[in-house]
Image (tube, rainbow, N blue to C red):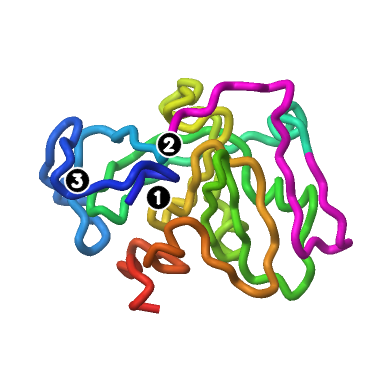
């Protein structure tokens, strides 16, 4: 698995910061272990920044049937959102209290709303990576298209210029280098969903694998 559209991973991987004890006033989803720092993991090479070519495209079953593309300036001009959230990887590690800053995913949805019968969204990123999420999760108040982590601008390795974070879902549902989404009236499986992982991916329900659906 990956941290958000990243390289396949194993429990034996070196964990930065090591395994920590969970504070007595906190809890983790079932099967998770607390680690000291957020690992950097990704599938394939890190994309080279090309802001002049960058577009965020919303298509599929939009309300008016039209596909729309927005430049980075338009996306970054939306109201800002700060979210403090834990990050949970399906390979059993978690990091507490990451401070993300960016734009609300629901405000980007409002730029090109879905048709009334849409329930799922295929979020796509660089190099053909995609993740299937429920519209209600993408439209939640804490789903964020992050530009900053811990007060610092995201590096390319962390997913710049935009990285989707949906805190209650496993981290593969939030691609790095996100470039848009397609609204779906019939669900399709994204990159990891095609490889045996869960269509929903709620970390607190331990929805890791497709056989649990």
Observer-nearest of 27 and 170: 170
Image side of residue 142 versus residue 103, left or right: left
Q: Position of residue 193 (x, y in %)?
A: 45, 63
Q: Residue at x 34, y 69 (%)?
A: 209
Q: Nearer the viewer, mark 2 or mark 3?
A: 2
User: Looking at the image, which is closer to me, 207 or 101?
Assistant: 207
**Rendered residue at 82%/47% (across/down):** 68
Q: Is residue 56 magenta?
A: yes
**Residue matched to label 3:** 34
Give neighbour class at mark 1: few <14, some 14-19, many 20+ (Cα, 10 Å): many
Mark carried by residue 44: 2
- Depth order, front residue of 197/104: 197
Q: Are marks 1 and 3 in contact (CB under 8 Å)?
A: no
Residue named by callout 1: 171
Q: Quadrant of the C terminus?
A: bottom left
Looking at this view, is 136 or 44 the one in front?
Answer: 44
Q: CA distance from mark 2 to mark 3?
A: 26 Å
Q: Which residues are magenta?
A: 44-69
Q: Earlier in the sequence, mark 2 or mark 3?
A: 3
Q: Is residue 156 left or right of residue 213?
A: right
Magenta region, mostly helix, strand or loop? Answer: loop
The CA span between labels 1 and 3 is 14 Å
Q: Is residue 128 left or right of residue 213?
A: right
Classify 60 as above or below 209: above
Up the image or down, 179 lies above or below 171; here it is above
Per the rendering, the mark at residue 46 is none
């Amino acid at each position: 698995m990956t941290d958000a559209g990243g390289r396949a991973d194993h429990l034996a991987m070196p964990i930065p910061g090591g395994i920590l004890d969970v504070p007595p006033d906190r809890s983790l989803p079932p099967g998770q272990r607390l680690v000291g720092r957020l690992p950097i993991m990704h599938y394939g090479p890190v994309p080279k920044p090309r802001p002049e070519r960058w577009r965020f495209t919303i298509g599929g079953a939009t309300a008016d049937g039209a596909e729309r593309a927005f430049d980075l300036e338009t996306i970054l001009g939306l109201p800002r959102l700060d979210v403090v959230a834990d990050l949970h990887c399906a390979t059993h590690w978690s990091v507490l209290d990451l401070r993300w800053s960016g734009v609300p995913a629901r405000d980007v949805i409002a730029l090109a709303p879905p048709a009334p019968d849409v329930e799922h969204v295929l979020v796509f990123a660089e190099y053909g990576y995609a993740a299937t999420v429920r519209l209600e999760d993408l439209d939640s108040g804490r789903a964020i298209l992050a530009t900053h982590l811990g007060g610092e601008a995201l590096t390319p390795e962390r997913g710049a210029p935009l990285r989707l974070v949906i805190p209650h879902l496993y981290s593969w549902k939030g691609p790095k280098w996100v470039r848009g989404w397609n609204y779906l009236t019939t669900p399709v499986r994204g990159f990891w969903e095609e490889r045996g992982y869960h269509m929903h991916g709620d970390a607190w329900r331990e929805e890791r694998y497709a056989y649990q659906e």
